[in-house]
Image (tube, grey):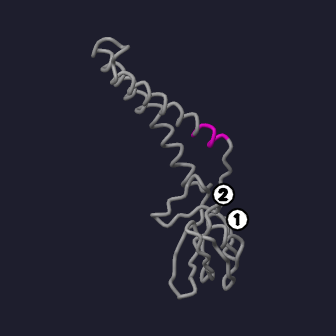
Amino acid sequence: MTSEGFKKLQEELEYLKTTGRDEAAEKIRVARGFGDLSENSEYDEAKNDQAALEARIAELEAQLKHVRILDESEMSSEHVHVGSKVVIKDKKGKKFTYTISGATEADPFNGKISDESPVGKAVMGLKVGEKGEAILPNGTTVVYTVVEISK
């Protein structure tokens, strides 16, 4: 994981443990005021939201406990790896620019794809000029050529 991704997870965890828990407790307190808890859908919803919040906190704590942060100074631009910014092109010459990330940091709509995604897998380890084949979710096979690699 990149240091940026690690920081984002830490910030989310801190927010959930403080503000998120406070908001969940307030929702439960307000819902209790609506009367009989056995027939109180607001209370049930507030408790379910609290359970989901606690599950996310536990998930983040487990992720952060076992994370390995990439040392960007040791990364090379010789081949594609997690943390690389890569420009690839398809057979038609259409270019795509992606940053290869771990699964927890992936954000395809913002150009960050996971090393476990079809395209990420196809280009991992390649050098400039080399080709990788990806089988897309729709079953189409696409060949990509690495055009540029940077940090």
The kind of residue on which mark 2 rests is Leu
Q: Residues within 10 Å of mark 1 (few under 14, many from 20)?
A: few
Name the residue rendered at 36%, 14% in the picture.
37
Q: Quadrant of the N terminus?
A: bottom right
Tell me how far mark 2 sits from mark 1, CA to CA.
8 Å
Residue 131 is left or right of residue 107, and the answer is right
Q: Position of residue 10 (x, y in %)?
A: 53, 43
Name the residue rendered at 32%, 11% in the picture.
36
Residue 105 is left or right of residue 40, and the answer is right
On residue 70, which mark appears?
2
> On the image, numbered disc 1 is attached to which residue?
74
Per the image, label 1 sits on a secondary structure element best described as: helix
Per the image, label 2 sits on a secondary structure element best described as: loop
Q: Residues within 10 Å of mark 2 (few under 14, many from 20)?
A: some
The kind of residue on which mark 1 rests is Glu
Q: Nearer the viewer, residue 143 or 88?
A: 143
Q: Is residue 52 above or below residue 118?
A: above
Name the residue rendered at 45%, 63% in the picture.
109
CB-based contact (under 8 Å), mark 2 and mark 1: yes
Q: Nearer the viewer, residue 102 or 19?
A: 102
Q: Quadrant of the C terminus?
A: bottom right
Q: Which residues are magenta?
A: 60-65
Q: Main secondary structure of the magenta part?
A: helix
Q: Is residue 108 above or below residue 125?
A: above
Q: Position of residue 11 (x, y in %)?
A: 49, 43
Residue 86 colored magenta?
no
